[in-house]
Image: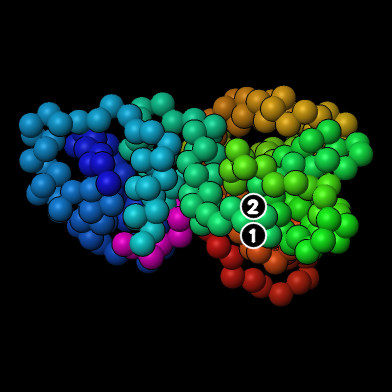
Amino acid sequence: MLIFTTEPHAFKRASQSISKLDKAGSLSACQAALARATGHRDVHHMQALQAKGHLVASATTDVRASIVSNLYKITGLRAGDLLDALIRARFFDGSPDPAMSLAVREAMFDADFADRGRHAVGSPCRIKASGYNDQRALVVERGEGPNSRSRAMMDHNIYSFVSREMPAYQAGSVFIPLRFWMPYGFWVEEDGSKIIFSRDYCPLWKIQEGKSPLRDDPDREVMFIDQQRFFDEGSFTGPVDDVMEQGMEILRQHRVVSLPRLVEWFPECLNTGRWISNLKRWPGGPQVVRAG
């Protein structure tokens, strides 16, 4: 692994940010873990390189993904929480952006679903069925014959096709469907907080005046006094690149630089073939332990 050595203040901010996570351990333990995750032998090795000016101004998507994955293996903390902590601390660069956060998490998921066999869960494909316009998708299950029942996850749900309608896309990679992170609208709570929600009406972000955006609990029941939408249904299901850019701009306007907790439901949805609405704990339902 390439060594990523950033300036001391960024390293300190990131270590402190990680130490605030649930079950993270002491600050010194988080410093040691971050030093190892970035390719150093220990904190002293990293400090020696910092003193010599061996600093990296920024990191590629793959390097960022590798560092978060290493931290996950070393600490056992949730990967989504670790990525959020590093992004908020401006560890990788001074101008974090939600598009880069999305690219990093997708690169991590791409490594988790590395099998590119036609029948492999998460294998990229394109939808050739009438009316789907060659849209991107991921295999949920594929039947043996060309006309056998198969299922694919797309940006807005999991759909059934026959196998020949969803040929493998060798140049593709794992992507996080829009409805796991895209803002669809917002609620206003009685105290004035704005809760950005997804198309499946899961809370994504809590926005409060004078405070950094907070990742919200997708299962939380929000008692709101007003509701507004950023999209209507027709525009939300438009060309994916156009919708993504609109969504990113909405997030930037609300100072969001990371990804919501709902993104961490993606592997379970893909592996079990259940959509967000099937996993969500609706009012009155039992408590569920979630990935984060």
Gap in Å between the C-alphas at discs 1 and 2? 5 Å
Disc 2 residue type?
Ser
Write the residue at 48% across / 41% down: 104
Write the residue at 31% across / 44% down: 14
Vertically, is 163 above or below 177? below
Q: Residue furthest right?
A: 130
- In the rendered image, residue 179, in percent from the top left (x then y), is placed at 72, 45
Closer to the camera, 5 or 159? 159
- In the rendered image, residue 225, in percent from the top left (x then y), is placed at 78, 43
Residue 80 falls inside the magenta stretch: yes
Closer to the camera, 185 or 150? 150
- In the rendered image, residue 2, in percent from the top left (x then y), is placed at 26, 41
Write the residue at 39% across / 53% down: 69
The magenta-colored residue range is 74-81
Disc 1 residue type?
Ala
Q: Does residue 85 appear in this view?
A: no
The residue to which callout 2 is attached is 123
Instruction: Label 1: state its secondary structure.
Output: loop
* Marking on residue 120: 1
Instruction: Label 2: state its secondary structure.
Output: loop
Residue 126 falls inside the magenta stretch: no
In the rendered structure, the answer to whether residue 35 lies left or right of residue 214 reads: left
Write the residue at 9% across / 49% down: 44
